[in-house]
Amino acid sequence: MVGNKDLHEQNIIACIWDFDKTLIHGYMQGPIFRYFGVDEERFWREVNALPALYAKRGIKVSPDTVYLNHFLTYVKQGPFKGLNNALLHELGKELKFAPGLPELFVLLKNLVRSRDEYRRNDIGLEHYIISTGLAEMIRGSMIAPHVDGIFGCEFIEDPVLPGYLDQEEFPMEAKGDISQIGVMVDNTIKTRFIFEINKGSNKTPDIDVNAKIRESDRRVPFRNMIYVADGPSDVPVFSVVRKNGGRTYAVYQPDNEKEFAQNDLLLSTGRIHAYGPSDYRSNSSTFMWLRMHVLQLCDEIVMTRERNVQRQVGMPPRHLHDGEKKPEKKDPEQRDLI
């Protein structure tokens, strides 16, 4: 008798990517500053000074996400007048990706279907982006068609007003500028989305991310995850993924010695398994590491699934050959169930 069927087949590999300085060289907000003619360097200097400024007023703010509020201030005060989600989506088309992208995303998906045993076990690979940047810009970029899920900061246009429950109809489309934050992602909240992928709540909303789910029922076990990011700010996710059996890889811009040193420190302190340049072309060490580990995960999935089948089903009956002894009959109470 086959044992109870698990909720998920656990034959999915998840490649999970940071965005800024990982998939692109720099920060995604650049096209916004160019569009509005705003001094980008000055804006970020203002953002970096805000936590200390507000602290003097007795107010704590998150250094990772206070830039979102400053964006809204720029919209309200005029420099970003006209910034809405449609424009963010359009500006996402201007993002320039690191060498080898998006070709790598396609190649890795094809890799898990490249062998008979992989296809027989229906192995799949999914790409996810988890970013403290702007989700709508990522959706507008050239990488979006190759991605299975995008988690990032979201803005609201035309927020509903007090008493909206008494209204019978609402406009179908928002037409105003962005005015509120819908989702705020910092480097700690990123770990929540890792658990959504792990438990499958991103695919099945009925599964609460905080629900207790046994390991064998989780859609993408941590051991099937590869997390790629650019450095120290991703330590919370590096720690969660590696601690639970996943693979972690850090990237640096090839000409940046400081980033190289940061990644080397992450390796020496056990945060990551390896690091390499943010170059995803087929002759790069990063490409070779990712390809090798995706293939290793495929082989592990095949071995695990075949071992589980043998354990649950058992050996089938067979004919005896000449010279073989007939197995002794067991006591009825000791017989294995078939």
Image (tube, grey):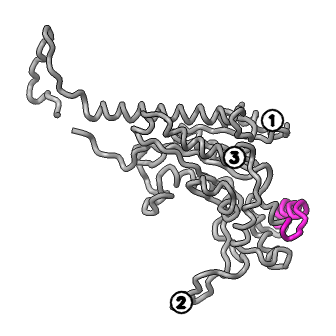
Res. 261 mark:
1
Q: Is residue 231 visible?
A: no
Q: Which residues are magenta?
A: 34-54
Res. 47 mark:
none
Q: Which residue is mark 2?
A: 169
Which callout, 2 or 1, points at the residue further toward the start of the chain?
A: 2
Query: What is the spatial separation of the Cα atoms under label 2 and label 3, in whole angstroms?
Result: 44 Å
What secondary structure is found at the residue carrying circle 2? loop
Q: Is residue 71 above or below residue 185?
A: below
Q: Which residue is mark 3?
A: 101
Instruction: Tell which of 191 and 119 is nearer to you.
Output: 119
In percent of width and height, residue 303 lies at 42, 30
Q: Is residue 274 visible?
A: yes
Instruction: Tell which of 326 and 223 is nearer to you.
Output: 326
Q: Is residue 13 above or below residue 337?
A: below
Magenta span: chief secondary structure = helix
Dividing the picture into quadrants, the one containing residue 172 is bottom right
What secondary structure is found at the residue carrying circle 3? loop
Q: Label 1 sits on what residue type?
A: Ala
Which callout, 2 or 3, points at the residue further toward the start of the chain?
A: 3
Dividing the picture into quadrants, the one containing residue 207 is bottom left
